[in-house]
Structure formats: C-alpha cells, structure tokens
Amino acid sequence: MTGLTEEQLKMSPDLDPLSLRNREIEQRLHANYGAPGYWDLETRHN
C-alpha cells in the first residue's frame, strides 16, 4: 500500500534519473505525489 491514487500514478511524469538534477523537474514530481521537497524541510540540529 502506498497511499497513492490511481490518478496520481497515471499522471506521474516520466522519470529519467538524470532529470533529478533539475530542481524544476523535482518540484513537479514532488507536487504530483503531494510530497514536500527536501529543499523545503527545516534543517534539523541534533
């Protein structure tokens, strides 16, 4: 179980591993799945 809808899977952008070096593509991928981007998460200090 993933919690993803069938529509999210159908609308998922094609994934080229090298495209993950492009922030715009990363943002679209995260937006498609409703996941926050690691670049938006607050840095945690131990």
Image (spheres, rainbow, N blue to C red):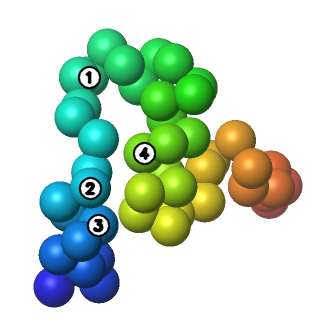
Which mark, by number, is residue 17? 1
Q: Earlier in the sequence, mark 3 or mark 1?
A: 3
The residue mark sitting in front, 3 or 1, is 3
Q: Residue at x 51, y 18 (%)?
A: 22
Q: CA distance from mark 3 to mark 2?
A: 5 Å
Which mark, by number, is residue 11? 2
Q: Quadrant of the N terminus?
A: bottom left
Report the side of 39 relative to 1 (left or right).
right
Q: CA distance from mark 2 to mark 4?
A: 10 Å
The residue mark sitting in front, 2 or 4, is 2
Which mark, by number, is residue 29? 4
Report the side of 37 relative to 20 (left or right).
right
Q: CA distance from mark 4 to mark 3?
A: 10 Å
Residues under numbered marks 3 and 2 in contact, where contact means CB atoms less than 8 Å apart: yes
Question: Residue 44 appears in which quarter of the rendering?
Answer: bottom right
Give the amino acid type for the residue marked by disc 2 in the picture. Met
Give the amino acid type for the residue marked by disc 4 in the picture. Leu
Mark 2 Cα shell of 10 Å, populated few (<14), some (14-19), many (≥20)? few
Pinpoint residue 15: horizontal percent, then vertical percent. Answer: 24, 32
Q: Quadrant of the C terminus?
A: bottom right
Q: Which residue is mark 3?
A: 8
Mark 3 Cα shell of 10 Å, populated few (<14), some (14-19), many (≥20)? few
Q: Residue at x 49, y 51 (%)?
A: 30
Q: CA distance from mark 4 to mark 1?
A: 12 Å
